[in-house]
């Protein structure tokens, strides 16, 4: 069984919206053994929609369309599909009631355009949308299933989980593809490739395929097997070799964020954490809080962005700030130590750097970042440089800081 | 002139990486009047790459491929294109020197795989990569230009800006499409559509096309004209009507974040800002700091996530926390006021809510969020509900809080 995705929307092609739906669908479908052969993005225009179906239906047994089902006048997909599958629209009373309920529950007035969302192509299977007002549609023709879903991500995901996956699992015995991912932080793709060159030859010779997936600060290694879950132990064993070989960088088997892994570690060690942030501006706090249940180990943070806050809230002396500069080993040490005591936490991470685009100095160019990690035992300090882009500097600082905290707890920082 | 995009990479189809390159290329190309007719994502496999080119080259004058050019063994695109265009690879000494330089500057050892990155198809135009080690390639055949670029976003963007756009502008006199966007916050797509129904009919009758682009907390309105920049004043005038009609929601003509617009407003009014965050966990701070130059108005934040920090850092009494609960009008008021004084800022925004998935109460379900905005004059307070998803709650809280600060400064909060 093969699937193709069609994402509909001018906003995707002119780049006003990034296509996250295709990524989610690709991941979920491949997990249940339905490979996505290709993913197309097209305009919300009848001609383009029909041509894509003509091209992709003969080559695939499943097509999932997303987008074009909104209540507004620029959404043409429902009408186009109704015509393509030679049927007509009729109001479905049951859906109308649900839409009315949807608005009642939220204390909002129902609009005329929303009534039209209860119109549905006769003969298609209705896929209930419990998170919004546009129903999903399931057509079948010439051995191919065509599913049309709204483009709003959480509505699309809801209908897939509630209505589409159960039907797909019932209809098809799928050959399961198996993927697993190893996460690394703070090592570039080429270096990683060199470090694991022999290992890479071994896993490939063993019939597994390997991919490097680099993004700023993180390189994921993905091993895939066509034999399905039966190879999971083998893949795990291979990845454990990397965890042992590169413990400062390889932090998780399975796709997890550093803050999630760090959270588990803090719970295990029964430790609390806080942060004192300057250049990372709350990003470390945000990453820690993102994890459900983080209140069990995360206490709070101080974003001391200006000199004033470094003095007022943290009690760093004005003289020291002038003498050493805010981006210095001395100040980062004080930030981490004073922060740990003020917040009353077991481990406190501090950041201070020049995020850019302005503020660079000859001996401290844009991208220079000091990170400190304070525990009762010591303050570990490191100076890094992440280059010239502000957003990249901020996110790299936060990722590196979180990984350095992990390494400090595990005794890996020299 | 029409363009098509081909994004290459297993990681895109199985959803491990979200395709941001296609969005960026779509936006940049449409701005210079080259519409992207379709965007395909395919596997890094010779057969798929060749078939896609066979299909798309006759229908387009420009194809841009991204991805598959990395140094590692899973990257097959350069070899495939070399074969497709009937040529062969040769080491280019100039590129080899640049790659050596690249590693020298970063104090890193050059690897064997990197030397192979200096191999280039004979007869293709070399597109220099000043941000990485994989060069871009420019082929021409049967009236179609085929450009192949690395998939790492900042490298791809660099080569487009340095090498591809200047060539395209020289080669083609392009008909300019013109898009402009109006940003709104805190109003759903259907409501917005109802509020501007008559306006919508008018703009469509005037030959413009309108799209609604919803994402959590933000709905963008996009007006497009096929007449190019000549219609920019007209579109601006239409959008100004919406700014006047819906000042609490419509916050910018042109695609800007609320934190950027708020930053401009704070500079105009010569005001400083800080935040005291519980459920938003530093996200407001992060959004403010993201803007270059924010140090001119942003002082700092306190993330008081636990009761302990609300007591220790902010000085809220334990009795009040027990009596009212952390998610309450009373506590949010104290957080905003005490925060404003402690941070020494003109305006301070506070958040406290139940982000979920746990912690809901019968009278305060998951998603309940209090936001406070304190100035010298008063504390404005509001209670909202954003539903059940943790990440969505956090980001919606931050967006709403930033917009409420904007409205408070402009005297729009009743």
Image (tube, coloured by chain):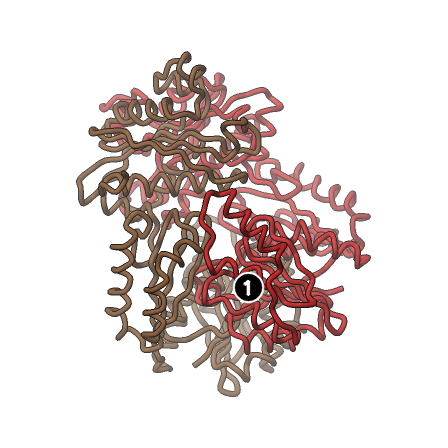
Chain colours: A red, B brown
The front one of A355 and A50 is A50
Question: Compared to A370, does B127 lie above or below?
Answer: below
Q: Which residue is at the far top? A: B319
The front one of B145 and B270 is B270
- Say few, some or many: other residues with alpha carbon within 10 Å of mark 1 (under 14 / 14 to 19 / 20 or more): many
Q: Is residue A248 left or right of residue B262?
A: right
Question: Compared to A377, does B361 lie above or below?
Answer: below
Question: Compared to B376, does B387 lie above or below?
Answer: below
- List x then y, in percent, for residue A22: 58, 59
Q: Which residue is at the far bottom? A: B142
Quadrant location, the N terminus of chain A: bottom right
Question: Compared to A299, does A180 lie above or below?
Answer: below
* Residue B75 location, quadrant: bottom right
Residue A95 shows in the view: yes
Q: Is residue B133 left or right of residue A238?
A: left
- List x then y, in percent, for residue A369: 38, 38
Task: Name the residue: 52% across, 85% down.
Answer: B141
Q: Is residue A79 left or right of residue A36?
A: left
Residue receiving disc 1 = B67
The front one of A67 and A331 is A67
Task: Name the residue: 46% across, 67% down.
Answer: A74
Task: Name the residue: 33% across, 43% down.
Answer: B403
- List x then y, in percent, for residue A241: 70, 40
The front one of B321 and A133 is A133
**Which structural element holds mark 1?**
loop
- List x then y, in percent, for residue B107: 45, 48
Q: Chain of mark 1?
A: B
């Amino acid at each position: 069984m093969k699937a193709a995705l069609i994402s509909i929307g001018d906003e995707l092609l002119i780049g006003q919206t990034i296509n996250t739906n295709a990524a989610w669908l690709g991941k979920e479908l491949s997990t249940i053994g339905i490979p996505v052969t290709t993913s197309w993005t097209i305009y919300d225009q009848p001609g383009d929609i029909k041509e894509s179906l003509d091209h992709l239906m003969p080559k695939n047994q499943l097509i999932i369309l997303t987008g074009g089902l909104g209540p507004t006048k620029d959404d043409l997909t429902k009408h186009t599909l109704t015509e393509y599958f030679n049927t007509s629209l009729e109001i479905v009373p049951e859906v109308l009631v649900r839409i009315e309920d949807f608005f009642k529950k939220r204390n909002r007035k129902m609009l005329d355009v929303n009534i039209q969302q209860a119109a549905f192509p006769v003969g298609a299977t209705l896929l209930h949308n419990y998170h919004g007002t546009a129903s999903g549609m399931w057509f079948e023709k010439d051995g191919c299933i065509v599913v049309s879903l709204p483009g709003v991500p959480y509505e699309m995901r809801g209908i897939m989980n509630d209505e589409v996956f159960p039907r797909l699992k019932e209809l098809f015995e799928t050959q399961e593809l198996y993927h697993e991912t190893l996460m690394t932080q703070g090592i570039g793709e080429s270096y990683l490739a060199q470090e694991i060159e022999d290992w890479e030859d071994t896993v490939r010779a063993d019939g597994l395929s390997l991919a490097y997936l680099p993004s700023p600060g993180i390189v994921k290694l993905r091993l895939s097997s066509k034999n399905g879950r039966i190879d999971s132990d083998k893949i795990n064993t291979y990845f454990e070799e990397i965890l042992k070989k590169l413990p400062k960088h390889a932090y998780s088997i399975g796709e997890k964020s550093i803050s999630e892994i760090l959270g588990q570690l803090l719970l295990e060690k029964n430790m609390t954490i806080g942060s004192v942030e300057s250049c990372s501006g709350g990003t470390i706090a945000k990453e820690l809080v993102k994890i459900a249940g983080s209140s069990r180990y995360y206490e709070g943070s101080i974003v001391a962005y200006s000199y004033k806050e470094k003095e007022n809230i943290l009690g760093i002396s004005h003289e020291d700030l002038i003498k050493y500069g805010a981006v210095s080993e001395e100040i980062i040490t004080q930030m981490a130590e004073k922060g740990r005591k003020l917040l009353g936490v077991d481990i406190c991470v501090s950041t201070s750097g020049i995020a850019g685009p302005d503020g660079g100095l000859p001996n401290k160019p844009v991208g220079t970042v000091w990170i400190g990690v304070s525990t009762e035992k010591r303050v570990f300090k490191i100076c890094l440089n992440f280059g010239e882009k502000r957003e990249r500097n901020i996110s790299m600082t936060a990722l590196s800081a979180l990984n350095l905290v992990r390494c400090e707890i595990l005794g890996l920082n020299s």
